[in-house]
Amino acid sequence: MKRHRMSSTQCPALTHSALFGVIVKIAVLAAVVFALGARGAKDEDANDGPVIIQAGAEWLPLDLELDIEQDSALDFSNLVPWHAPAGKLGRVIINAQGKMALADRPNEPVRFYGCNMCFGAQYLSREEADRLATRLQRLGYNAVRFHHYESGLVARTQGDSTTLKPDARDQLDYLFAALKQRGIYVTTDLFVSRPVFASEVWEGATGDVGMDNFKMAVLVNERAFENFKAFTRNLLGHVNPYTKMRWAEDATLAWLSLVNEGNAGNFLGRLSGRLKDDWTSAWNRWLAARYPTREALTRALGNLDAGQDATAGTVPLPARIDDSPAGIQLGLFLAETERSFFERTRKFLRDELRCQALLTNMNAWTNPVQYQAVRAGFDYVDDHFYVDHPQFLEQQWRLPSRCPNVSPTSQGAPGGRRCAFLRLFDRPFTCSEFNYSGPGRFRGVGGILTGALGAVQDWTIIWRFTYSHSRDSMFRPRPAGYFDLASDPLSQAADRASICLFRRGDMTAAKHSVAIGMMADDLLKAPKSARSTIPSWDWLALVTRVGTHLAKSPTDVAGGADLVLPLPWSALARADGGKILAVDPYARDAGDKIVAELRKRGWLGASNPTDVNAKRFQSETGELTVDGPADVLTLDTPRTAGGYAPAGKKIETKAVSIAIENTDATVWVSSVDNAPIAESRRLLVTHLTDLQNSGVRYRDQARRVLLAWGDLPHLVRSGRATVTIRMKNAAGARVFGLASSGKRLAEIKTSIADGALVIPLDIAAAGKARMLYEVELGN
C-alpha cells in the first residue's frame, strides 16, 4: 500500500501554502497505518550513534546544473526516433495485437517513459514552461503525468469546487501546449486531491470532504458523481487557446485514469458518518437485487441476525474483504460497484465530451481477484509501486522518518514484481507511479531495476514519481528529498538507464509468459474466494512475462499466455491442452512447480541460475541477472551493459567488464548513437555510489532513521571503479568527464589492454564529484 507524498521539509513553496496544509492533513488519514507499523517496528540499530554527513575525503560536493546541453551525450531527445507535435501520427490506440500504437502506424508498437509533475510544478510562466518542456524532451521523456494539479486549478470562490481559475487554467494550457509541441504526450487522473465542499456531496454538510472520502463517495453518491462530472466537463471541455482544441479532442491527452488510487477496498475500514450510510445503503440495495429472498441471502452471507434485512437496509457493511462468506460477497459487491462507475464515466466521456483518450482506473493497493473482471473493461491496466517509501515515526509528513535502506539486489529486486500480475495479457500495462525513494542509498540501482523489469515484462509505459513538487526546485538547485528528480541528480542519472533499457528497447522482452487463469463467471457469478490477485511467486516477473489470462470460455486457452495456472474452482481448470498447468496458483509450492515446468519445457536452460530459495533470478533471455546472495545485478544487452555490485566484486558482460574497487556502486555503459557498444562511436558511462545533502543527519549508523535533510551542496560518496570496454578501434577513443548538464569537462587518461579500452572511474575530480563520462571515437 502506497501513501500520499508530500514533505514541507523539502518543498518550501508548498510549506507556505494554506492549501498544502489542508492536503497534508488529508494525507494523515492515508498513512496512519504505516505510522503505527513504524512505531511498533524493531529498530535493532536505531540508537547506535548518530551520523552527520559533511564534505570531506569520503563525500565530495557536486555542482548541479538543471538544464541539458543540446547535442551533448546527455541529450536523449533523439535517442529514440520520435515525432512532434504529439498527435502528428494520430491518436495513441490499442492495435489488434493488444499493444499501444499510433493511429497512422497501427502495426508499430510504441513505448513511453515519462515523469509525474505535482502541485506548483505545473503552474509556470510561459518562459518557464518552454524551458521545462525542452529539458524533459532532452532527458528522453515522451510522456508527462499531471498529478495533484486540481488544488491549484479550482477557484472555490463561488461555493463550488469545479470552477477553474482563469489564470491557473491558462498556465496549465500553455504547459500542455509546450509539451505537445515537443512530442510529449500527457495523462492525468480526473480526481486526485481536489478539495471538495462537503455541501456539494451532502445537503447541509459543512467543511470539506476528505480526499479519500471523496474517492469513496463518487462510487455510491449521485451528488458526488455529478460533482466529478462537472469538474471533468470544465477541464476537458474547455478550448486550450494555445492548441485551438478542447482537451477532450486533443490526441496529446492520450490516456486518462478516473480516480487516483481509488480502489474501494483501500478505505473501507475508515468509513464513518454519512459516507458510511451511503455505502451501507448501496450494499443493501445490491444484496436485495442479487439475493431477493431471505434464504438466498442467508446462503450467500451465512447466518443472519433477526434484524438484518437487505430490503430494510439493515445488513451491516463488512469491514474487510476476506474468504468468509460475507468477505467474498463484499469483494463481488466492490467489483460490480467499480465496474458500474467506470462504465458510467466512460459513457459520459465518449458520448457527451467526445473524448477518445484511452481509459483506465483502480491503480493501487487492494486487488481481490474479482477486480480482474472489472479491468477487462479498461483500455489498459495501470498500477503503482514504491521502494523505501518513508515511514513517519512521530507525525505524518514530518521528520523523523524511517526507511529500510537495504540493497534491493540482495533482496531479489522485489520492487514492481507484485503489480506485474495485475496485467491482462490482451491489453497494455502501464505503471503511472514508481520510485525508489530518497534518501535511500540504493536508489541508483533501483531506478535501473524498474526499466529492466518493464522491458522483460513488455510493459507499455512507465512514469517516474516525480520530477518535482514545486516550481522553485525546477529552476534553481534544491536539496534532495524523498521523490523529486529535479533535486536528485543521482536518481535522474539512473532514469537514463531505464530509458535505454525500456523505451529504446535495449533489453528484450521475455519470449514466454505464465498467467493465472480465470473467467469472469468464476469471479462474478459464483465466486469461491476474494483473495488478492498477487501470488507468492511474484519473483517470476524477473524471469518471464507474468499476468492474468481472463478467458472468454472454459476452452479459451489458445490466446493470452503460454502457460496458464487456472483458479482451482474455475471451469478453465478442466480445459485440455499443453498450456494448462494443473497447479493451484496460490498454493505454497506453486512457484517451485512452475520453475520445474519451465525447465522441463526448455524455457530456462541448464545455465540459467534461477534459484527461488536463494533469491537468484535470471530472465529467460539471459540479459537480466539478479544474484541476491552475491548482491550483484548484471545487465547484459548489446547497447546497455553493466549493473550493481559491492566493493571488491566484478560485473561481467559480453561487451563490458566492471571492477568495483572501494565503494558499492551502480555502473553501466550505454551507446548513445544506437549502435551496439562494441561498434558505437559515442558512449555514456555512468558511475553512481550514493548522494546525500550536506549536513544530513541520521539517528543510526545504518542510516535508516532520518532526522534532518541538510542543505546544498549535494555530496557524492567517493568511490573508484575500472571499466573495460571491448570495442572496435579502442585506441582511437577519447574519454571526458561530464557535468550534470552534459558539458564536457576534463579529458580522462585511459589505457588499452588486449585491444579493449580501460577507463579508470573516480568520483573525486579536483575536489568535486563526477558521476558521468563520455566516450567518443574520432574519425
Image: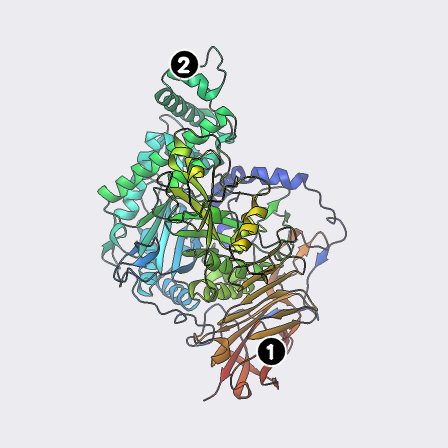
Q: Quadrant of residue 258?
A: top left
Residue visible at 54% across and 81% down? 736
The residue that disc 2 covers is: 294
In which quadrant will I find the C terminus? Answer: bottom left
Q: Would you say 500 lies left or right of 633 here?
A: left
* Type of amino acid under label 1: Thr
Q: Would you say 688 lies left or right of 177 here?
A: right
Q: Taking the image as drawn, is residue 27 in sight?
A: yes
Residue nearest the viewer, comparing 550 with 681:
550
Q: Classify mark 2: helix, strand or loop.
A: helix
**Image label count:** 2
Q: Taking the image as drawn, is residue 16 in sight?
A: no
Residue visible at 37% across and 27% down? 202
Q: Which mark is residue 724?
A: 1
Residue nearest the viewer, comparing 266 with 607:
607
Residue 587 versus residue 137 in the image, above or below: above
Residue 55 versus residue 166 in the image, above or below: below
Neighbour class for label 2 at 10 Å: few (<14), some, many (≥20)? Answer: some
Residue nearest the viewer, comparing 239 with 678:
678
Q: Classify mark 1: helix, strand or loop.
A: strand
The CA span between labels 2 and 1 is: 75 Å
Q: Would you say 344 lies left or right of 9 here?
A: left
> x, y (%) of residue 502?
45, 62
> x, y (%) of residue 686?
56, 71
> x, y (%) of residue 683?
50, 77
* Type of amino acid under label 2: Arg
